[in-house]
Amino acid sequence: MPATLRRMDEANRRAERVRRDLAEELRRSRIQCGLSQEAVAQALGCDKATISRLERGLGPDIGVGHLVRHASVVGLVLRLDLFPAGAPIRDAGQLKVLNRLQPHVRPPFVWLLEMPVGPNDLRAFDAGAVMPGCRIGFEVWSRVRDVQAQARSSQRKKVDARLDRLILVFGETAANRSAVRDAGDALRRAFPLTTRQVLTALRQARDPGEDGLVFV
């Protein structure tokens, strides 16, 4: 099964678990507060049948606003957190950049797609090139917005993954080159290798020696 379909399948299972867990929490807290379903429905401006369905995890998808109000009525505070869960679903532009990069990676390097940061870490690099003595992570963007923020996030991942090299890969556009120039000398000091230097090292199947920026 393709990685995107696996990720969506897992997301659907997670959504169902969250729905059931929320339903049970809302039901249990309502009972502890001594409230009837009719009282909760009246406070929320809906009918009892809606509350009954929600408490059994049978209701349709509902908005965050309703959940916040429903939780408040039964003495709860809803808190939502988001955290990285690996590479996002790629757009067509990013796939094109990856496809232009891959032919430069020659054996004995092994090309990896969505290389995990670690066994217990949900983050991943967009791609990787691995051979004995050298592990390279690639972060790939077809359109870059905040280069410095994206670079900092990638550098943290490099440290956590204990990679040898980190290569930031951008689609070859005037806008992307302008964004990198605007990021200033600090970015170039952190990623000193040029496109030619990085791609030459990959084609020669050797460690580039430092981190770099690539436009393809």
Image (tube, grey):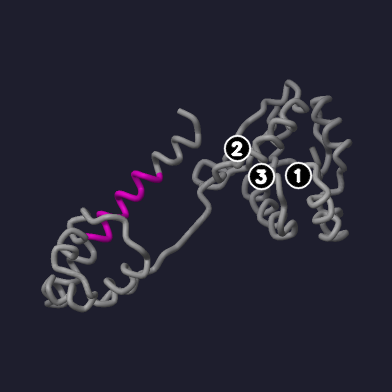
Q: Amino acid at mark 3?
A: Arg
Q: Secondary structure at mark 2?
A: strand
Name the residue: 59% across, 41% down: 90
Q: Is 126 in the magenta? A: no
Q: Does residue 194 appear to the left or right of 153 in the view shown? A: right
Pair 1/3: label in front? 1
Pair 1/2: label in front? 1
Callouts 1 and 2 close, C-beta under 8 Å: no
Residue on which disc 2 sits: 115
Which range is magenta? 11-23
In the image, residue 85 above or below residue 128: below
The residue nearer to you, when weighing 7 against 84, is 7
Q: Earlier in the sequence, mark 1 or mark 3?
A: 3
Instruction: State which quarter of the image contains the C terminus.
Output: top right
Q: Secondary structure at mark 3?
A: loop
Estimate the spatial distance between the alpha carbons at disc 3 and disc 2, rounded to whole Å: 13 Å
Q: Amino acid at mark 2?
A: Met
In the image, residue 37 above or below residue 187: below
**Location of residue 93 in the rendering, given as x and y in whole percent from the top left corner:** 67, 40
Estimate the spatial distance between the alpha carbons at disc 1 and disc 2, rounded to whole Å: 18 Å
Name the residue: 49% across, 45% down: 120
Q: Does residue 26 appear to the left or right of 191 in the view shown? A: left
**Location of residue 81 in the rendering, given as x and y in whole percent from the top left corner:** 45, 62
Q: Is 18 in the magenta? A: yes
Disc sitting over residue 170 in the figure: 1
Residue on which disc 3 sits: 162
**Location of residue 149 in the rendering, given as x and y in whole percent from the top left corner:** 70, 60
Q: Does residue 183 appear to the left or right of 114 in the view shown? A: right
Q: Amino acid at mark 1?
A: Phe
